[in-house]
Structure formats: structure tokens, C-alpha cells
Image: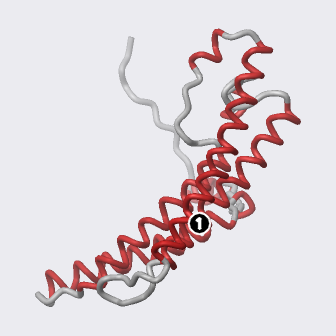
Amino acid sequence: MSTAEVHKQITADEIAHTFEEEAIPKVDLGQYAIEDWLALAIFWIMALCVFLQFFTRYVLNDSYAWTEEIATYCLIGVVFLGSAMCVRLSRHIQVDLLFRYLPRLPARALSTAIDLIRIAFFGYAIKLVWLFIQVVADERMTTIKLPKGFVYYIVLLGFVMMFARSIQIAVDNWRRGYSILERPGAFDGTEG
């Protein structure tokens, strides 16, 4: 048995045509929602603040104190708006092992109960954050003297979006007749 490699001669035109045949994938921005874009914008503000902090500290040897505080508050916004993204996409941590062993009707009932508990939790969190804002709304940030209430309004917006997305997911689950917990393969393309 020979181990010699066999090469077929091809012309430069054939090579050039291989690049023409490749389909250019189309960009689809329709899959992103408002919380995606808000989180992205706040993320880039945070990234710029962190870069400015690094640059002023290690290059200029005189750091701006406000950049760390702004970056911290931006991280809070990214986390809570990013959580709304996770709710919309059903990407939060979930344990679906039990659903593999439950019959269809008990699994459906448990999944519906989970949807209702999630909606109630986010509704209650909205109330708690609103009460918290009432307490700290007049406090000022340490370095730039802006009201801290602004930061917590972003947290409130995140919880409102999570609440709304939870309702949307629950309605979709009820209409579809199953959730990602019951049939994860239907959501990731492995069920066929």
C-alpha cells in the first residue's frame, strides 16, 4: 500500500472561482431585542471607562478616580439588562433532569408552576427595587456627585424587562404545549 500523496493540478482560474462560489452569510440583526442593544451600549461605556482607568493609571501615572465608579455602575446595568436577555432566550441556569423521568402531564404542570413562580418572583423584585429606590434616590455617588437613583432605575428597568419576558415566555410555552424544560431538544435543534 502506497503512502504517496496524489495532487491534482488546478489552474489559477479554478482557484479564483472557488472564492466566488462561497456564499456570503447575511447578517440578521432581527434576532436582537432592545435589552440586547442597551446592554451592549452600557458595556462599551464600561469598557471605555476601564480602558481610561488603565491608561491614566499605568501610562500617565495619575489615575482618574471616577472611572472605577462609573465602570462599577455600568457593570450593574450590564448584569441586569443581560439577565433580561437570558430570560428572553431561556438561558438561565435550569435543572431539567427531573423532567426526563416525569410523565407528560406532571411535567407540564410543573413547568407551568415554574413559569408562574418566575413571573411572581420578578414582579416582587420590581416592588422591592422600587422601594429601595425611594430610600436611596437622593444619595450621591462618591466621585461624580450624580444621584445613585439613576443606577437603580436601570436595575428596575432590568427587572421590568425580565418580568415582561417571563410573561412572554410563559404564554409561548402555554400555546406551544411544552417548555424548554420538558423538551430541550426542540429548542437546540437536537430533537428531530
Residue 105 locus on image (x, y percent): 80, 15
Residue 13 locus on image (x, y percent): 61, 59
Residue under the point 55% across and 41% down: 92
10 Å neighbourhood of mark 1: few (<14), some, or many (≥20)? some
Residue under the point 66% across and 34% down: 188
Residue under the point 55% across and 26% down: 95
Residue 36 locus on image (x, y percent): 61, 63
Number of on-image labels: 1
Which residue is denoted by mark 1 in the rendering? 130
Q: Amino acid at mark 1?
A: Trp
Residue under the point 62% across and 58% down: 126
State the residue in front, 110 or 50.
Answer: 110
| Quadrant holding the C terminus | top right
Residue 184 locus on image (x, y percent): 66, 27
Q: Secondary structure at mark 1?
A: helix
Q: Is residue 27 left or right of residue 82?
A: right
